[in-house]
Image (cartoon, helix red, strand yellow):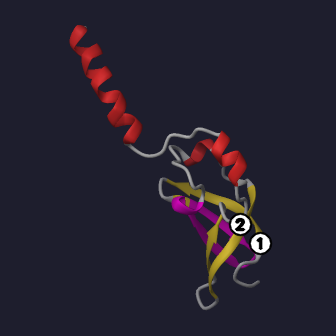
Amino acid sequence: MEINERIICKITGIQSYGVFVEHGAYSGLVHISELSDHYVASIEDLFSIGDEIEALVLKIDDKNKRLKLSYKQAHPMHPRIQKMVKIKKGFHPLAQALPHWVEKALKK
């Protein structure tokens, strides 16, 4: 196994900050920032424990048998498709919706 190699991993755990995986004798983490270029509201909506995923190796710790991996780099979205798909990022859409929500709540 080498850095920048694509490997198949099995998901063993899901936390709010990322996905834990196993690959042979190694355990690894795909941090939430390495799952997608877009906002991920719920990792459980994307993956389940037991799923096999392809990930790109970013870092190898042979001593502790640990891996740092990237799912998004193993599955890049074509820029043309990215322009066509309107995905809302972060908290900006919430800030835009807040005045409407406040007005609606005051009317109730």
In this view of the protein, can residue 50 be seen by the observer?
A: no
Mark 1 residue element: strand
Looking at numbered disc 2 in the image, what kind of residue is underneath it?
Ala
Residue at position x 66%, y 52% in the image: 49
Residue at position x 71%, y 66% in the image: 55
Q: Quadrant of residue 104?
A: top left
Q: Which badge, 2 or 1, is on the more N-terminal residue?
A: 1
Magenta-span inclusion, residue 22: yes
The outermost residue toward the bottom is: 63
Give how far apart the Cα atoms at labels 2 and 1 are. 5 Å
Q: Are marks 2 and 1 in contact (CB under 8 Å)?
A: yes
Residue 96 image position (x, y, % from top left): 35, 32
Q: Nearer the viewer, residue 105 or 8?
A: 105
Residue at position x 59%, y 45% in the image: 44
Q: Which residue has dot 2 on it?
A: 55
Query: On the rendered structure, is 68 left or right of 88?
Result: right
Number of marks: 2
Magenta-span inclusion, residue 98: no
Q: Quadrant of residue 100?
A: top left
Q: Nearer the viewer, residue 65 or 34?
A: 34
Mark 2 residue element: strand
In the picture, the disc for residue 6 is 1
* Stretch in magenta: 19-34
In this view of the protein, can residue 9 be seen by the observer?
A: yes
Residue 31 image position (x, y, % from top left): 54, 64
Mark 2 neighbour class, 10 Å CA radius: few under 14, some 14 to 19, many 20 or more: many
Q: Is residue 81 above or below residue 61?
A: above
